[in-house]
Image: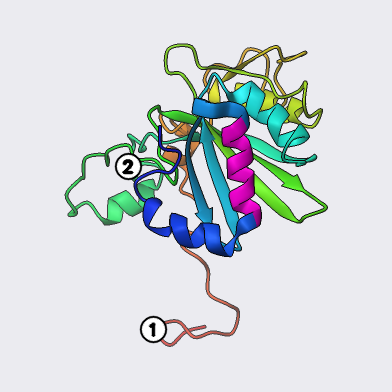
Amino acid sequence: MSHLSSTDTDEAGDAAATDELRTGLVEGLVNELQDGVVASHLLPGRDLWVRVTAEAWDAAGRVGRDVLRCSYFCYLSVIDWLPSPFGRSMDSSVDNILEHVAAKDPEPMTHGVTGGETRFQLLARLYDVERHVGVNFKADVPDDTLTMATWTKHFGGANWHEREAFEMFGITFAGHPSLRKLYLPGDFEGYPLRKDFPLLSRMVRPWPGIVDVEGMPGVADDDGGE
């Protein structure tokens, strides 16, 4: 299995020659995870993304900490690649102005660097504070279970990040010690950060910046008044 996506192969040779440190991190992951590494994307001298399988997610956290020496946990979150089914409906005032513009069908679902096959992906970043290098880990969340292994056993800081992902996106983390809500009322239904969650308040009240803004004091109006 190739561990570089088709969009990355052209730059792979240059990356290996100009960024041995990050190339070594990819090699370390492949040695440990084997086919658990799906694809990687390297920007020489800048950053690195590695996509692993859902089954290898748990091991990726351990390898990142113990083998790659990335002891600092930066964050964990979720990407919803579903194009918004609401289009511009959240900006209702804009829609009123642009009624003559034909509505467009939602764009097809596409993924970022390293690709993807499911609607939701986990994204986590680890950092080696001694060598000043980081790795962005990505993994497809299975559509049928929406469940991934917890990283709390590897990084204590993953605790509330996973709770937030659970609350806002509906992703379950198997093995999490206390997967409960952080922000929303206990009886709240739905997942507000999913692309298909309707923000009804914004359909009634426009986004800030869309509403009319009063002129500055002392500035003449179009009719010559102040």
Q: Residues within 10 Å of mark 1 (few under 14, many from 20)?
A: few
Q: Amino acid at mark 2?
A: Gly
Q: x%, y% of residue 48?
A: 57, 50
Q: Which range of residues does the magenta coloring cover? A: 21-31
- Image disc number at residue 102: none
Magenta span contains residue 67: no
Q: Earlier in the sequence, mark 1 or mark 2?
A: 2
Q: Main secondary structure of the magenta part?
A: helix
SS at mark 1 in the image: loop
- State the residue at coordinates (76%, 23%): 152
SS at mark 2 in the image: loop
Q: Amino acid at mark 1?
A: Asp
Q: x%, y% of residue 60?
A: 64, 29
The N terminus sits in image quarter: top left
Q: Is residue 170 visible?
A: yes
Quickly name the residue at label 2. Answer: 87
Quickly name the residue at label 1. Answer: 223
Q: x%, y% of residue 202?
A: 47, 40
186 displayed left or right of 47: right
Q: Residues within 10 Å of mark 2 (few under 14, many from 20)?
A: some
Residue nearer the viewer, 219 or 50: 50
> Height in image: 38 above or below 94?
above
Q: From the viewer's perspective, is the residue at label 1 or at label 2 nearer?
A: 2
Q: CA distance from mark 1 to mark 2?
A: 37 Å
Residue nearer the viewer, 225 or 134: 134
> Height in image: 56 above or below 145?
below
> Height in image: 212 above or below 129?
below
